[in-house]
């Protein structure tokens, strides 16, 4: 009773101290604030911003990347194409960083990491400095920028370099475009080559008209490029049939029949040492 009387007295004092207009404005602002909070909570729930640990959004963030060499045999054994599709691996560690280049023994330039926009310029600079030593570009990449992959592949072909994917490594998304540039293309045991559709990053509800035009132009460039490299265009058909969040993994016999791979890669040598740097004035 004491608390109730105190509250009533405070309300009475507030009403007495404020004109009717001020009270109405306060009530209106309170109603609007509560309404906005409720709408924001509903919108957040609809977009998966909040929820239980089982929500799709949180599962995508928390699910660890698959260990490709371990799961590939079971994928390649599946006769049905749809059953051979695997979740696109999420790059982490060195693979998530911009592609870096290291020249090692045997004339091999190791290219590891994501093909970020502009990385083709760094690759061209590396070739310009060490081109006399480079015989083979060894790829281990989750892919990335298609335009840069095409530029890297063209340069590889112009320089008559071979390309290689070592045993247990992988080349996915746009990386096979770089791989296709090799005059000889070697794939190691349990290595993975996978493709999927070209898509605009961050688009959830389909592409706008201008973006669709860009995507179609890129697709045409990729087809022309693969034809120029002597690769069967069925490779691109598999890419266009595969959703962007999946990966179509080629079987070894498919790589050869489609002329994407021309030879098997030997196991990497544990004794390979970096090649000497070329000194330029």
Image: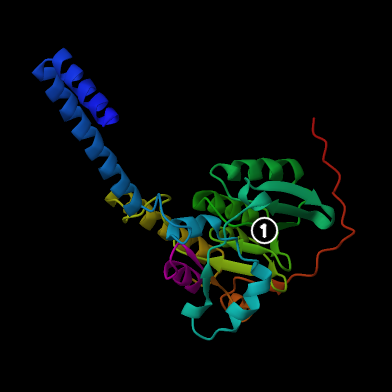
Q: Is 64 inside the magenta-drawn segment?
A: no
Q: Nearer the viewer, residue 26 or 114?
A: 26
Which residue of the protein is positioned furthest toward the right in this rendering? 271
Image quarter of residue 178: bottom right
Query: What residue sits 50% from the left and 50% below the top?
Result: 147
Residue of label 1? 140
Residue 145 against residue 189 in the figure, above or below = above
Rendered-image quadrant of the C terminus = top right
Which residue of the protein is positioned furthest toward the bottom in this rendering? 79
Query: What residue sits 34% from the left and 48% below the top?
Result: 44
Residue 170 on image: x %, y %: 65, 64
Residue 118 against residue 51 in the figure, above or below = above
Q: How many neighbours does mark 1 have within 10 angstroms: few (below 14), some (14-19), or many (20 or more)? A: many
How was the colour assigned to the protein in this rendering?
rainbow
Q: Is 240 inside the magenta-drawn segment?
A: yes
Residue 276 against residue 24 in the figure, above or below = below
Image quarter of residue 65: bottom right
Residue 118 against residue 74 in the figure, above or below = above
- Inspect this view and state whether residue 198 appears: no
Residue 147 left/right relative to 73:
left
The magenta segment is 234-247
Residue 166 left/right relative to 85:
right
């Amino acid at each position: 009773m004491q608390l109730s009387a105190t509250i009533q007295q405070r309300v009475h004092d507030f009403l007495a101290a404020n004109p009717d207009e001020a009270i109405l404005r306060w009530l209106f602002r309170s109603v609007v604030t509560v309404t906005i909070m409720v709408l924001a909570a509903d919108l957040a729930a609809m977009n998966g911003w909040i929820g239980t640990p089982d929500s799709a959004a949180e599962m995508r963030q928390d699910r660890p990347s698959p260990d490709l060499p371990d799961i590939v045999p079971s994928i390649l054994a599946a006769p049905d194409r749809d059953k051979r599709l695997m979740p696109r691996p999420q790059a982490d560690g060195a693979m998530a960083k911009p592609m870096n280049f290291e020249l090692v023994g045997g004339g091999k330039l190791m290219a590891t990491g994501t093909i970020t926009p502009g990385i083709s310029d760094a690759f061209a600079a590396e070739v310009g400095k060490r081109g006399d030593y480079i015989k083979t570009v060894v790829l281990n990449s989750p892919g990335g920028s298609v335009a840069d992959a095409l530029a890297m592949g063209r340069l590889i072909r112009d320089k008559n370099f071979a390309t290689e994917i070592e045993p247990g490594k992988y080349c996915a998304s746009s990386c096979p475009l770089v791989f296709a540039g090799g005059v000889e293309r070697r794939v190691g045991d349990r290595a993975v080559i996978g493709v999927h559709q070209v898509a605009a990053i961050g688009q959830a509800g389909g592409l706008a008209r201008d973006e669709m035009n860009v995507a179609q132009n890129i697709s045409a460039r990729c087809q022309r490029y693969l034809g120029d490299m002597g690769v069967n265009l069925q490779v691109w058909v598999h890419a266009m049939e595969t959703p962007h969040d999946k990966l179509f993994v080629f079987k070894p016999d498919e790589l050869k029949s489609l002329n994407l791979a021309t030879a098997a890669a030997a196991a990497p040598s544990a004794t390979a040492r970096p090649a000497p740097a070329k000194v330029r004035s």
